[in-house]
Amino acid sequence: MGVVGVSTHNAPIARTMGESGLIDAPMDQVNQILDVYFERASDVYRLCSGRDVGLVGMKPYNGGALLVLDGQPTGITPVRCLSHTLSLPVSVALPGPRNVQELQAAPGHAQATWRNA
């Protein structure tokens, strides 16, 4: 059984991969900044979901920029970032933690709700 997955940081390329029928699982950035402020990926979500193509959501922390800005905590937690990403039609979220604290916080998503994230 072969599965082809490709990673990109570009929503139009992810959309093209999903449309092609050649890629089983495009991997694209999925996080609150891109979704809320840029409405960047919603068509990619719909396309992959509608074609039964797995979407791997990478960088839910936006490289840590959602957690710390100018050296100060933003108040957004890793659990909240993962909750957002996993509320979308993704097959899996790959957080890519920058440090041990971010790594240790990730499993907390399974026990959290959006309100206490």
Image: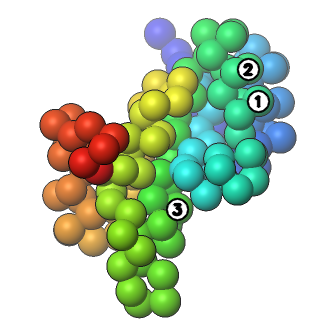
- Say which element carries label 3: helix
Residue 84 in which image quadrant: top left
Residue for badge 1: 43
Residue 115 in which image quadrant: top left
Residue for badge 3: 62
Left or right: where does residue 116 sit relative to residue 2? left
Mark 3 belongs to which amino acid?
Asn
- Say which element carries label 2: helix
Q: Is residue 4 visible?
A: no
Rendered location of residue 46, percent (x, y): 70, 21
Mark positioned earlier in the residue sequence (3 or 1): 1
- Say which element carries label 1: helix
Residue 45 in which image quadrant: top right
Residue at image position (47%, 51%) is 60
Judging depth in this view, the residue of 66 and 104 nearest the camera is 66
Rendered location of residue 117, percent (x, y): 29, 50
- Vertical comparison of 17 with 78: above or below: above
Report if the CB atoms under discs 3 and 2 are less than 8 Å apart. no
Residue at image position (65%, 50%) is 36
Judging depth in this view, the residue of 38 and 60 nearest the camera is 38
User: Gap in Å between the C-alphas at discs 3 and 2?
Assistant: 22 Å
User: Gap in Å between the C-alphas at discs 2 and 1?
Assistant: 6 Å
Report if the CB atoms under discs 2 and 1 are less than 8 Å apart. yes
Mark positioned earlier in the residue sequence (3 or 2): 2
Rendered location of residue 104, percent (x, y): 17, 58
Please tell me how crowded label 2 is: few (under 14), some (14-19), or many (20+) other residues with Cα within 10 Å.
Answer: some
Residue for badge 2: 47
Mark 2 belongs to which amino acid?
Leu
Q: Is residue 88 visible?
A: yes
Left or right: where does residue 32 sit relative to residue 112? right
Please tell me how crowded label 1 is: few (under 14), some (14-19), or many (20+) other residues with Cα within 10 Å.
Answer: some
